[in-house]
Image (cartoon, helix red, strand yellow):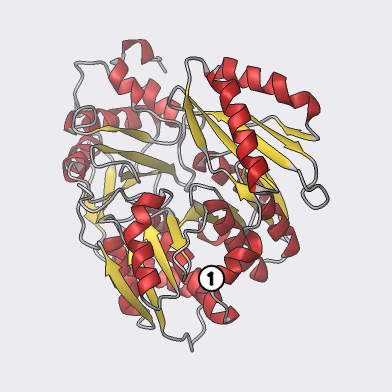
Amino acid sequence: MVNNIANMNKDVFSVFKAYDIRGESPQLIDAAFASKLGIALVKSHSLKRVMVGRDMRVTSPELEGALIASLVLQGVDVVKIGLCSTPMFNVLMGLDGKYDLGIMITASHSPSKYNGFKIVDQNLLQLGLESGLDKIRDAWPDEGQSVNPFAAQEGNVTHDDGALDRYIDYIIKLADLPGDMPEMKVAIDAGNGMAGFVMPKLLEKCPWIKAEKMFFELDGNFPNHEANPMKPETLEKLRQNVKQESFVCGVAFDGDADRVGFVDETGVQIKGDILTALFAGFVLKEKKGGKVLFDIRSSWSVAEAIASEGGEPIIFSVGSAKIKKAMREMKAVFGGECSMHFYFSDLWFVESGDYATLLMLKYLAKSKEPLSTMRQRIDYYHHSDEINFEVKDTKSVLNKVTAAYVKTATKVLDFDGIRCEYGDPKIDAQAWWFNLRASNTEPLVRLTVEATTEALMKEKVEEISKLINN
């Protein structure tokens, strides 16, 4: 295959990210881009049958139409799902098991000016720049080339009109809910994203969930807040509602509903690594002794919680494409990231915020204790969250910090940047660790620090920040 990178417009090249295609739309990603993507897909893969779905963003219908037209002209049969969440899309790919590729049109949690494409193979492995997305990029047609029908026969388009019901029925059955689930009051913030399309059907089939529906109207402009459950400012209204009413928890989704965050009954937002530990505990009750993957930014308490439930904790790199592949290879039962991606082996190692919500409510009902108590049992160290620094040269900054700290560390992990640990938190009152890693897409380094005391955590954040900035 001829490598066309040198001939590509640099703006086009820039939208190929580590785990998906994403950029401003329609400025960079428009109908012409989608049409050329169809050409590149056919050139880089042997395609006979693909599934295409989309979210509610303003440009998604136009991108969907152009992509499908391009594929069909080249002889590819397309199953069109239409509006769907990414979890719904992935689960349908897994249930049907007869597609060469799946293309989901979405920019996930990104602001309204963006759109893009998440592409998965027939095994539901997400294509990244190290796992197939590079081949699509390298097959990009020349600047003036448009779709030229060369297939002996055009492909067909089939509409999957029962997709939503099949998805909801599957995850409800998989959750294995007791027949006597009590009524549970829950505040659910769809963020004007695709959870507003999926959740009404789930609530219809689970009438025991008494939901306060927040921002369920589909709106690609995200008029109420950014659909990103990691950011505390996006959950302000949800926290207020939960504190004012007797809700067992609050639930918040990102734009395409694959990531999900939770607020406990006191209005406290639960961090992604702590949620990883909670969900791992739920899964390990059914899959004892299983392996659980979690990302390198995660608290010491995550590994401790997994081990206490009889699981095997495995620390791993950040990134959905990498962690899903590793989970398959290791036969892990669960994986989670600080970004609130939670991966279930029973769901082809993909995420589903809807399924995660059902599990959370199931085990809240079983435990008969509040979510705040569950959280506090795990969330006992002092964690900085990830802090971003814009730098000129990420490699030199990483080398400088590594040289300053690695020699005195009691444990060093040298993947995905570096993680240096100092002491054992179970016996050392002044134990701490940091992770410093480079962004895949921007001139940024990202710092995370955790310590046994808040004062030590803040001291080390300030100390390392000064070194980064000097």
Image quarter in which the C terminus is found: top right
Name which residue lies at 23% across and 29% down: 33
Which quarter shows the N terminus? top left
Q: Which residue is mark 1?
A: 371
Left or right for 7, reference 172: left
Residue nearest the viewer, comparing 10 with 81? 10
Pick the residue in front: 281 or 68.
281
Residue 99: x, y in percent?
Answer: 39, 48
The answer to which of 223 and 313 lies nearer the viewer is 223
- Visible in this render: residue 34? yes
Whole-percent x, y for residue 128 in the image: 46, 34
Q: Is residue 392 above or below residue 43?
A: above
Rendered location of residue 377, percent (x, y): 65, 65
Residue 250 horizontal side relative to residue 197, left or right: right
Q: Residue furthest right?
A: 427
User: How many C-alpha atoms fall within 10 Å of the one at disc 1: few (<14), some, or many (≥20)?
Assistant: many
**Residue at 61% in and 28% down:** 464
**How many numbered dots are placed on residues in this image?**
1
